[in-house]
Amino acid sequence: MHVLVAEDDGSVAAALVSALTRAGHACTRVARGSDVLLRHRDAQVVLLDLGLEDMDGLDVLRQLREVSSLPVIVVTARGDERSTVRALSLGADDYLVKPVRLHELLARLLAVTRRYSPPDEPLRVRVGSVEIDIDAHRVHAADREVALTPNEFGILYALARRAGQAVSRRQILDEVWGDAYVASSRSFDVHLGQVRQKLPEVTITTIRGLGYRLEDAA
Ligand code: CA
């Protein structure tokens, strides 16, 4: 499986990557928390150190959990109960104190990923008269085809596959731009405005302080 190793200590990271690679896993190693938030979508599990170059691992975990339920194993020198409880309550799936025993790490890795199945991505989404074909990247509304740019299409898909539910702005930014925190929010507003204009068949309601909800306008 693909493991994202977030560890700022070069020798610890090298030991982890080498053990994981020997066990048949592919690794991406990052030293910064912001890179975890940028690159988590390619990974099936994250090994998260708490003392990273740019931010505290617990903050990384909190921000990651706003957009993803990807399995996370905290691997840290902080062995105190308070840090463990905080990490688990923020959504860590497991917690290992350094120095880690490599066979135990590999076993825990398999255990947390076994429990996790990624959310289904439907191939076709229909809301009222609007139909979105994901593979073909086409949108039909009533009997016309609607031309959308890739970003507009991404926003529509992110909202339409959860029609009737509130979707946070960060969730959409993460899914469309691959980055929930850095992407320009002004450009997001422009794209969203275009989707609203091109598709009057759906209503996209802004939920203040949270995000958006898409519904059939009829
Ligand atoms: Ca560290």
Image (cartoon, rainbow, N blue to C red):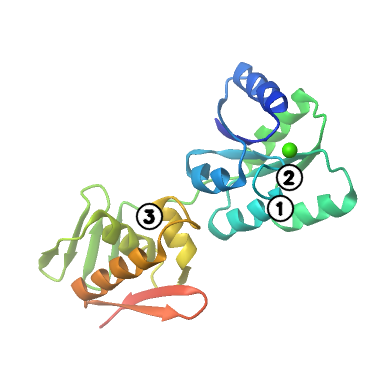
Label 1, ligand 1: CB separation under 8 Å: no
**SS at mark 1?**
helix
Residue pushed farthest left?
144
Q: Is mark 2 within 8 Å of ligand 1?
A: yes
Is disc 2 surrounded by few (<14), some (14 to 19) or many (20+) residues within 10 Å?
many
Q: Earlier in the sequence, mark 2 or mark 3?
A: 2
Please tell me the numbered disc located at residue 133: none
Q: Residue at x 41, y 79 (%)?
A: 206
Which quadrant of the structure image shows residue 169?
A: bottom left
Compared across the picture, whether 6 is left or right of 120 comes to right
Task: Measure the C-alpha gap from mark 2 to mark 3.
Answer: 28 Å
Residue picked out by circle 3: 176
- Pointer 2: what residue? 50
Query: Sequence order check: which comes first, mark 3 or mark 1?
Result: 1
The amino acid type of the residue labelled 3 equals Val
Q: Position of residue 58 (x, y in %)?
A: 71, 52
Cα gap from disc 2 to disc 1, whole angstroms? 6 Å
Q: Is residue 27 left or right of residue 166?
A: right
* Label annotation for residue 58: 1
Where residue 16 sits, quadrant-wise, is top right
Given the image, on which type of amino acid does mark 1 rest?
Leu
The residue under label 2 is which amino acid type? Leu
Q: Quadrant of the N terminus?
A: top right
Q: Is residue 18 left or right of residue 78?
A: left
Q: Residue 168 placed where, x, y %?
A: 48, 68
Viewer-nearest residue: 211 or 157: 211
Disc 1 residue crowd, few under 14, some 14–19, many 20+, Cα 10 Å: many
